[in-house]
Amino acid sequence: MRCPFCGNIDTQVKDSRPAEDHVAIRRRRFCPACGGRFTTYERVQLRDLIVIKSNGRREDFDRDKLERSVRISLQKRPVEPERMDQMISGIVRRLESMGETDIPSKTIGEIVMESLARIDTVAYVRFASVYKNFQEAGDFDRFVSELRPPTPKEE
């Protein structure tokens, strides 16, 4: 593993242990050239996924990009980091187990929204506002009104 500080390729592993979600290995590394210490994570990857964007462009699936968007949605919400990591790992496992290597971005967005709806409705609305490209306050009103159960009509 290349040292992120000096670029040396001969770094040493000082400690390895399972990450909190038990789907990754956390490794503490040391660079003998500059003395720098850093952490890496090793995960199982079942297959290389390709995301098909709405404009037809193709790009490699990026777990970090998914994680950033979920973290932004859950920012300042009462959701434990472990729960967030479990959700992200579950989404990735679900995508990998679909049997396809080419996955439309729309499918990924729908799976993320479904997962967020189960753990935090505010994060769900935040993600949906970007995913569905809300343009005005009325878009929020319509979306949130769909979340509310219908009120019984008085006679």
Image (cartoon, rainbow, N blue to C red):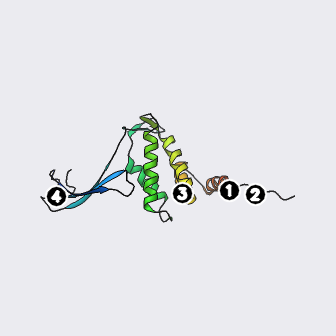
Amino acid under disc 4: Cys
Amino acid under disc 1: Arg
Pointer 3 or 4: first along the chain: 4
x%, y% of residue 71? 44, 58
Q: Nearer the viewer, mark 3 or mark 2?
A: 3
* SS category of the residue bearing label 1: loop
Q: Nearer the viewer, mark 3 or mark 1?
A: 3
Mark 2 = which residue?
151
Mark 1 = which residue?
148
Decide if residue 139 is on the left or right side of residue 11.
Answer: right
Amino acid under disc 3: Ile
Q: Nearer the viewer, mark 1 or mark 4?
A: 4
Pointer 3 or 1: first along the chain: 3
Quarter of the C terminus within the rendering:
bottom right
x%, y% of residue 17? 29, 56
Pointer 3 or 2: first along the chain: 3
Cα gap from disc 3 to disc 4, whole angstroms: 40 Å
Q: Relative to 54, is 20 above or below?
A: below
**Would residue 129 be seen by someone viewing this image from the given angle?**
no
**Would residue 79 be seen by someone viewing this image from the given angle?**
yes
Amino acid under disc 2: Thr
* SS category of the residue bearing label 2: loop
Circle on res. 31: 4
Foreground residue, 43 or 49? 43
Quarter-of-image position of residue 145: bottom right
Decide if residue 23 is on the left or right side of residue 132.
Answer: left
Cα gap from disc 3 to disc 1, whole angstroms: 16 Å
Circle on res. 119: 3
- Label 4 neighbour load within 10 Å: few <14, some 14-19, many 20+: many
